[in-house]
Image (cartoon, helix red, strand yellow):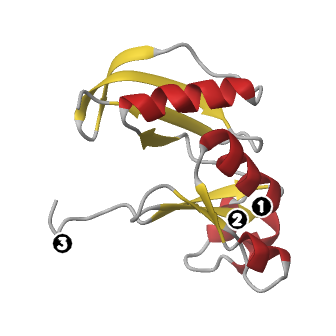
Amino acid sequence: MTSKSARLDHVVLWVADPVAAAGFYEEAVGLQPLRVDEFAEGKVTFPSVRVNEETILDLAPHGVADRMRMLPGSADSAGHPVNHVCLSLPAEAFDALRTRLQEHGVPVSDIGHDSFGARGEARRTFYFRDPDGNVLEARHYDE
């Protein structure tokens, strides 16, 4: 990948309680929370969690929908989650995530095999929901 390649910067997920959502993504998923204290203090509109050095998930409260005016009808997306967000992980991290989710009582799907994605066929994959109903997929490719 070069500096001229398109990259995924962020995905905005609608959540009921951004602080609780950040806690879920930190504790159950293992992602680094960002700006949670600033959100709690009213200094920023939403917190985020870091997926990797280039990508974050923004955890937007439903209450900010009326401020989403980047395009006509943008505010109407509140409460309408995307179909799913996929996290690609090394095999060890994939196994650790599945274990951590189960330890936190998060239901997970069966493991699927040979699912097509950005890097070709993923060796294994599974799905789970966050507390707000957003669906996430975890996968790993042969390294």
**Contact, mark 2 vs mark 1 (Cβ under 8 Å):** yes
Specify the amino acid type for callout 3. Ser
Q: Which mark is residue 3?
A: 3
Residue at 70% from the left image edge and 22% from the top image edge: 107
Residue 99 at x, y = what percent?
Answer: 61, 24
Disc 3 to disc 2, C-alpha distance: 29 Å
Disc 1 to disc 3, C-alpha distance: 32 Å
Q: Earlier in the sequence, mark 1 or mark 3?
A: 3
* Mark 3 residue crowding within 10 angstroms, few (<14) / some (14–19) / many (20+): few
The residue that disc 1 covers is 18
Going by the image, does 109 lie left or right of 67?
left
Residue at 29% from the left image edge and 30% from the top image edge: 141
Q: Is residue 41 above or below residue 33?
A: below
Figure quadrant of residue 4: bottom left
Residue 82 at x, y = what percent?
Answer: 57, 47
Going by the image, does 19 lie left or right of 120?
right
Specify the amino acid type for callout 2. Ala
Quarter the N terminus occupies = bottom left
Residue 14 at x, y = what percent?
Answer: 70, 57
The residue that disc 2 covers is 60
Figure quadrant of residue 15: bottom right
Residue at 36% from the left image edge and 36% from the top image edge: 90
Residue 128 at x, y = what percent?
Answer: 62, 30
Going by the image, does 124 lie left or right of 98?
left
Badge nearest the viewer, 2 or 1: 1
